[in-house]
Image: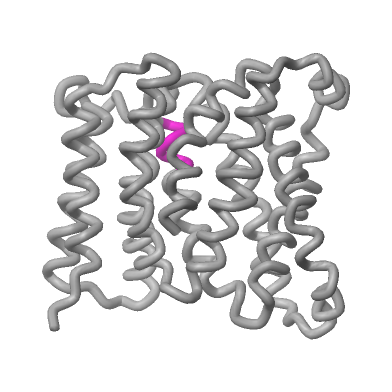
């Protein structure tokens, strides 16, 4: 999980760079096509098990495919229009809080320390977005809209994927989700632009390889695989290692500034995750 989170951290910078070359829909399509093809050799012997998969699991997979599409569109557009390091901190520190809220709504169980953690997480998110200096309207800024959408969608996905693997092999489940997203993306892509990648430079290919094979084929697959085994809340805690990897990578590669509000808000949000997951003996 730690190595998976490292690939996620640098992916925010990778995404901003590849966004200079291709449209958002084309990036989503290529990312998931490559991700599916990377997993294909590992699932060929498992394809016969599809006949034993319940209908509700197929609904789960299709829902994940749609949510993956929405998340990645917002991911590529947010990093293109805004600061990638900022997005990496905002999304990955607020997502576990959103996951907790969803789980609490389902189980209707919430303790005092979890309420405290939730409030601290919300405060951290507001500080990251600098709303105390720029006002609540700042939440509606372009980059914030897409990054907040990423956080909410991923929180929903974390819960859904924890249930989707009960009756299905995890690798087959992951590959199926990637395949559905690839198919959905086909209706939005520009084939002429995609064919033009043969003329792109090494900078594009190395960053696209990292954002697809690294962050998705490896990082996201590991995350999905771990979710039903560790639980959605516990799995999301590993995300706390991502924010500052994303922030430092963006600063190092893209020259993006590291502002005090992002660091302070990120630390508070990470503390909130620890508090939410703290269990008394």
Q: Which residues are magenta?
A: 145-150
What is the chief secondary structure element of the magenta stretch? Answer: helix
Q: Does the image show residue 193? A: no
Relative placement, left or right, of 67 versus 27 is: left
- Please give the name of the residue rendered at 27% of the width and 30% of the height, measured from the top-left corner: 129
x%, y% of residue 162? 51, 71
Find residue 46 and report its image quarter. bottom right
Q: Residue at x 22, y 22 (%)?
A: 259
Q: Is residue 148 magenta?
A: yes
Q: What residue is shown at x 37% (from left), y 52% (from top)?
A: 239
**Quadrant (top left/top right/bottom left/bottom right) for the C terminus:** bottom left
Question: Is residue 135 found left or right of 20 in the rendered image?
Answer: left
The answer to which image quadrant residue 47 occupies is bottom right
**Between 31 and 186, the one nearer to me in the picture:** 31
Of 239 and 116, the residue lying toward us: 239
Whether residue 255 is visible, yes or no, is: yes
Q: Position of residue 200 (x, y in %)?
A: 75, 16
């Amino acid at each position: 999980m730690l190595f998976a989170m490292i690939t996620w951290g640098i992916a925010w910078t990778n995404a901003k760079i590849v966004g200079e070359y291709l449209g958002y829909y084309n990036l989503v399509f290529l990312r998931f096509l490559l991700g599916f093809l990377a997993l294909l050799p590992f699932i060929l012997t498992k394809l016969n098990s599809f006949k034993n998969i319940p209908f509700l699991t197929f609904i789960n997979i299709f829902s994940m495919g749609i949510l993956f599409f929405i998340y990645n569109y917002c991911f590529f557009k947010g990093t293109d229009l805004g600061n990638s390091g900022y997005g990496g901190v905002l999304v990955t520190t607020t997502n576990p809080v959103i996951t907790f809220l969803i789980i609490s709504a389902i189980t209707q169980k919430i303790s005092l320390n979890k309420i405290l953690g939730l409030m601290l997480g919300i405060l951290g998110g507001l500080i990251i977005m600098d709303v105390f200096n720029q006002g609540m309207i700042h939440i509606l800024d372009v980059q914030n809209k897409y990054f907040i959408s990423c956080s909410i969608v991923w929180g929903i996905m974390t819960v859904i994927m924890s249930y989707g693997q009960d009756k299905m092999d995890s690798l087959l489940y992951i590959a199926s989700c990637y395949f559905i997203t690839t198919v959905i993306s086909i209706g939005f892509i520009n084939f002429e632009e995609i064919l033009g990648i043969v003329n792109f430079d090494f900078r594009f290919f190395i960053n696209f390889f990292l954002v697809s094979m690294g962050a998705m084929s490896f990082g996201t697959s590991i995350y999905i695989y771990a979710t039903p085994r560790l639980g959605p809340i516990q799995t999301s805690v590993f995300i706390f290692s991502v924010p500052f990897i994303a922030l430092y990578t963006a600063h190092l590669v893209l020259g993006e500034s590291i502002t005090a509000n992002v660091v302070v808000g990120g630390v508070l949000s990470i503390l909130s995750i620890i508090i939410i997951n703290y269990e008394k003996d």
